[in-house]
Image: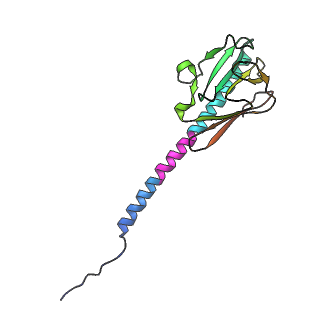
Amino acid sequence: MHTQYQKNKGFTLLEIIAVLVIAAVATLVVANTVSRGRSNLAGRTEALKSHIRYAQSMAMSTDEQNWGIRFDTTENQYWLFYCPTAQTSGVNIVSIPGAEPGPGDKVDLDDANIDIIGINPGGTEVTLAFNNFGTPYYGDLNQVLGNLLASEMTITLADPAGNTETANVTPTTGFVP
């Protein structure tokens, strides 16, 4: 007696399960990477909002000192400062609480792979400052108390994937939602 074996065409159950497991693992890795980048952007935006609130709080709690944040979009960094006058002479860069001390105590967003893509109103070098009443002003790097903020200031940050987050400063009150 001679038995003939049939050639089966197709995949075994074990092969199908192996492919599904590999696909699931790859999907989890990609999803985790994407969400981690998005959470980094959201975290940096919330940190920026906190730094703006801190500057306003310090301006209101110290007599006759203007506090604020200066942005340099070409260098992709910002820093906290105080100045006893409305002029640029006497500007003191201050370490941001909780931030790693760095060169000149500036927050360098390149380290986090985040870009400042716009400040409106403003330009590439913008000062956002508060007087001792917490009133927001904006100007360039040559001004501490430049122009009274008459419309909402929007600072937009972006990650390499093109996701954006904004920090808004309300005119007159300086409220940061």
Q: Residue at x 76, y 17 (%)?
A: 132
Q: Is residue 102 above or below residue 26?
A: above
- Closer-to-camera residue (71/69): 71
Q: Residue at x 53, y 33 (%)?
A: 112
Quadrant hosting residue 128:
top right
The residues colored magenta run 27-39
- Closer-to-camera residue (51/115): 115
Left or right: residue 103 versus residue 164 is left
Residue 33 percent location from the top left of the image? 50, 45
Q: Is residue 3 above or below residue 58?
A: below
Residue 16 percent location from the top left of the image? 39, 66
Residue 13 percent location from the top left of the image? 37, 69
Quarter of the image for the C terminus: give it: top right
Characterize the magenta stretch by its predominant secondary structure: helix
Q: Residue at x 77, y 20 (%)?
A: 146
Quadrant hosting residue 174:
top right
As for residue 20 lying within the magenta part, the answer is no
